[in-house]
Every structure is written in C-alpha cells, then in structure tokens.
Image (cartoon, rainbow, N blue to C red):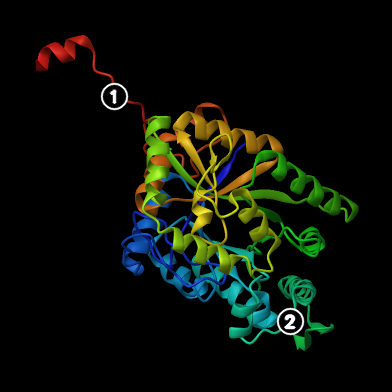
Amino acid sequence: MTLRFHWFLPTNGDGRDIIGGGHGLVSGTAGSVRSTGIDYLGQIARSAEQLGFVGALTPTGAWCEDSWLATAMLTEVTERLQFLVAFRPGLISPTLAAQMATTFQRYSKGRLLLNVVVGGEPGEQRAYGDFLDKEGRYERAAEFLEIVARLWNGETVDFTGAHLHVEGARLTNLPDPIPPLYFGGSSQAAGPVAADHCQVYLTWGEPPAAVGEKLDWIRHLALVRARQVSFGIRLHVIARDTSEDAWRQARRLIENVDPEAIRAVQAGLARSESEGQRRMRALHEGSPDSLEVSPNLWAGIGLVRGGAGTALVGSHSEVADRIEEYARLGIDEFILSGYPHLEEAYWFAEGVLPILESRGLWSHPAPDRLLPAARVPFAPTSGALAATS
C-alpha cells in the first residue's frame, strides 16, 4: 500500500489562527491574516512539491479566489505538483468545462485533478444564478458528468436531459491524461452520482467508524454498477514532536475566539443544505467543550470554519497511527491542511511522512530528493551537558 498526500492552497487567506469562512460563510478569522497573493501561494505550492505531496486542493466559492485561474498561474512556479481544482458543475457549461480541463492538461503536462462540488448553500448558489434545489443540483451534476466524459472520450455529443442540453458538442483536442474526478457528498442523492462517475470518493474527517460506514455505502453502490472507486479524506493536521505540544497548539487556535463569533458561524452553518456539514456540526454541537471526538481527532476548527472541520492532533507517531487506521478502512488519499499552511506543511512532512515511509505506507513521488530526517525531541547526552556547563 502506498498512500498519497495532498496539501491545501488557502486562496481565502492564511495565518497563525483559524481562517473562517467557507461553504456560504463570510470570510473571517480569529486573528491576523496573511496576504495570499500568488507569491505566497507559490511558496506553499513549491514547498508541498519538495516535501512529497503529490497535489494541492484549491477551494471554490464566493469566499475564495477562482480555483481555475489561481492554479493555472501556479503551474508556472512548480514542476511536478498536481492541482486538485474544485469547481461547481452548475455554474459552467459542460462543453466549456471539458475544454478548459483539456487546455489545463496540455499546458501543465497532465497535472490536473478535478474536485466536483455540487454545492450545498442555497444563498451562495442563488448569488451565482443557480436556483435549483438540492435534488436538482445532483441530477444536473450527473448529466454534466456524462456529457464531459463522452467529450473526453472523443465523441460528438447530442444530449437532452432534464437540466442540460447540448447539440453537436465536440473537442478539437482531448485531455492527456483524462483528469480523475474527486467527488464528495454524504446525502442519499450524492451516492449514485459518486458511484456512477467519480474515481475518488471524498469524505470529511469523521471518526473512523463513521467513515467506514460511508465507504461501505459507496463500495456497494459502485459494485452493483461494476465499477471500482478509490477513497480519500479531507482533514486538517497539527503534528508536533510531542503530544503535549500538539494539543497546546490546538487549544491556542480557539482559546481567544469570541463565543459570539462561534454562535454566529454556527447559525450560518445551520442553514446549510449539506448533509456533510450537518455531520461536521454534530461532532461539536457548537460547544468548545469535549472537542476530541475520537482519539487524536479534534473538532475545534469546525467551530469557526465551514466545510472540513476536524484535525488530526498529536505527536508525529500518533498522527501516523491515525492515518494508518484510516488506511485500513480503505482510504488511500489524504488531503491535509493546517494553520499556517506553509509551516504546517513542514511539520507534517518532516515529522509524519518519514514514519509512514518506515512502515512501508508512503514513498516520496520524486525519489531522487534528499530524504528528510524524522523529527524527534532533542535529548542531549550527559557528555553534551558537561561540555556546556
């Protein structure tokens, strides 16, 4: 088993505190925000590439920068890193999306991955001119993905569905390779779309038992369709030399957050139509108490951020153990992030990845790089103490 790790490009802002916003929320933060221009995002992307991440997720929505444009610029400052571009199928023509992906693959030399986001916040969808209800959005997504797949296979497509209609659609060039589709969704309407069309089903970071149930659900749906689907998980991470240091950092992230800010964020998230968001909120119920919802799984980030709201917290070995636990369920792709994203990429890659490599669970995608040494707490010998006393 070889696990794949992706990092996150915070086009909505970064800093040493939790950056709020996401999934229909207005951006906000518990502290100062770094400017996330292309120079800073390039630092994160280049570091992720050097450290051994295979790709980087870029979010979509009114709360962040456009994912297609940002990642297209970042292909120029990276060499190997793939870009997991989140996009909403209801906001763009399927023919145009298929053409954009083809162009991206050609100019990036095949570094595009696509994260299909159906959308769960009615207010934000309406701001973009999308007035379908949740069921309608999933129906449209299925039609969209069928059209795109046929175009990528070189067909000339005539299609009339309940929501989409194209005539004589075709591509002058075809993507090489065809970008894999990553798809997340916890509602009953999401499962068939994932099983029919995606290559990687994504879940947010719920406790292992809950994740296992979701994976079994999608496996069954894929099996009856004679398809196989891989699995990924989206998590934040706080890994340190010791467990105490990691939990100290987790507590620091929320200790100065105004309780009124938490109530406002939770009120906004309560209006979400997303089943995944409901499951995230159920882990903490809006309270800063009892946030370790499973060993080393902390729900504190979800108090002030929409979307992925849990983090793996612990020593490097503890975080590696939890990753191995998810891997035994069938997860083989991990999309991670942390505040700030530049520094936390190093904490994780230099501390956790060497442990996973020693267990035969990971190898650097560019094996000719210099191997990072595992981070271990400094423990001077008595001789060293004598020499400095």
Give the camera-side residue of 153 and 298: 298
> Percent x, y for residue 235?
55, 49
Against 145, is 233 above or below? Answer: above
> Percent x, y for residue 372?
37, 35
Secondary structure of the residue carrying tag 1 is: loop
Give the camera-side residue of 150 and 210: 210
Residues at badges 1 and 2 in contact (C-beta under 8 Å)?
no
Q: Quadrant of the N terminus?
A: top right
> Percent x, y for residue 380?
24, 17
> Percent x, y for residue 245?
37, 34
The answer to which of marks 1 and 2 sits earlier in the sequence is: 2
Please indicate, yes or no, whether residue 275 appears anywhere in the rendered image: yes
> Looking at the image, which residue is at 79% across and 73% down?
135
Residue pointed to by mark 2: 132
Q: Residue 193 got which mark?
A: none
Residue pointed to by mark 1: 378
Q: CA distance from mark 1 to mark 2?
A: 57 Å
Lateral position of residue 10 relative to residue 377, left or right: right
Lateral position of residue 294 relative to residue 224, left or right: left
